[in-house]
Image: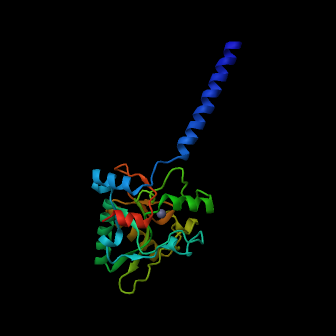
């Protein structure tokens, strides 16, 4: 009896220990906070470089919502709305998307791209619901410079196409599988999805505006603000 009792204790300690270790590992995603470390990573692998999107796609339109209060948190989360970044291969793929849309009389409008980890944490503190906000314990595609939120505009008057809902609309109407929409809206969603997927982006089922790039080069979560990143990009 006593041996079984001991085994049980050992088992319990082991299980609880594992769960705790799991939780600790889960709660701490590795982040790059230091611009110097980021620069070292770029020196070893130039494809890690974070590119200010307009340096590659000068005519892309920015409507960086988190630099304003016009977002679901009603809080200004960035200091400046004039710049945003993506990893080099992601920005290059986006340039191809823009070129193809331009040929059809359309262009891209960007709501958000790179999001410093501190901003994801701020969002989490404000909303604290992983249906709407990325759980900071994992680090998101936006934190890695691999994800982008965007829509399509007409070149002729810069007006947004009708995609059925606004940005950050967290109802099922924003889902790709939601088909009870005007045929023009469905066509517009298909145009965005097909063009993005053609150049390697992956759609996100519950948000028609969110596209991501595969983390094929072990891109790490960055927590470097836009200013420091801009300085490091030259
Ligand atoms: Zn997104």
Q: Nearer the viewer, residue 47 or 194?
A: 47
Q: Is residue 194 visible?
A: no
- The image quadrant that residue 34 belongs to is bottom left
How far from the left and from the top, in percent, is residue 38? 37, 55
- The image quadrant that residue 54 belongs to is bottom left
Q: Residue furthest right?
A: 1
Image side of residue 11 versus residue 155, left or right: right
How far from the left and from the top, in percent, is residue 49? 32, 59
| Quadrant position of the C terminus in the picture | bottom left
| Quadrant position of the N terminus in the picture | top right
Q: Nearer the viewer, residue 100 or 71?
A: 71
- The image quadrant that residue 62 belongs to is bottom left
How far from the left and from the top, in percent, is residue 165? 53, 73
Q: Is residue 170 visible?
A: yes
Q: How many marks?
A: 0
Q: Which residue: 37% across, 55% down?
A: 36
């Amino acid at each position: 009896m006593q041996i079984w009792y001991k085994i049980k204790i050992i088992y319990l300690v082991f299980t609880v220990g594992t769960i705790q270790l799991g939780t600790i590992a889960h709660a701490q995603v590795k982040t790059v906070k230091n611009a110097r470390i980021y620069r070292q990573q770029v020196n070893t692998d130039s494809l890690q470089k974070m590119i200010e999107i307009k340096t590659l796609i000068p005519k892309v339109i920015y409507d960086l919502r988190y630099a304003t209060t016009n977002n679901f948190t009603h809080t200004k989360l960035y200091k400046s709305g004039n710049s945003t970044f993506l990893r080099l291969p992601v920005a290059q793929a986006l340039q191809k998307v823009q070129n193809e849309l331009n040929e059809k009389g359309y262009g891209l409008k960007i709501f958000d791209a790179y999001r410093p980890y501190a901003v994801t944490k701020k969002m989490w503190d404000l909303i604290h619901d992983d249906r709407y906000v990325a759980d900071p314990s994992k680090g998101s595609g936006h934190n890695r410079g691999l994800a982008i939120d965007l829509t399509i505009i007409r070149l002729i008057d810069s007006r947004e196409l009708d995609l059925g809902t606004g940005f950050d609309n967290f109802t099922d109407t924003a889902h790709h599988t939601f088909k009870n929409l005007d045929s023009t809206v469905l066509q517009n969603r298909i145009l965005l999805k097909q063009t993005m997927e053609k150049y390697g982006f992956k759609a996100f089922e519950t948000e028609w505006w969110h596209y991501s790039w595969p983390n094929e080069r072990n891109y790490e979560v960055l927590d470097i603000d836009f200013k420091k990143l801009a300085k490091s990009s030259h």
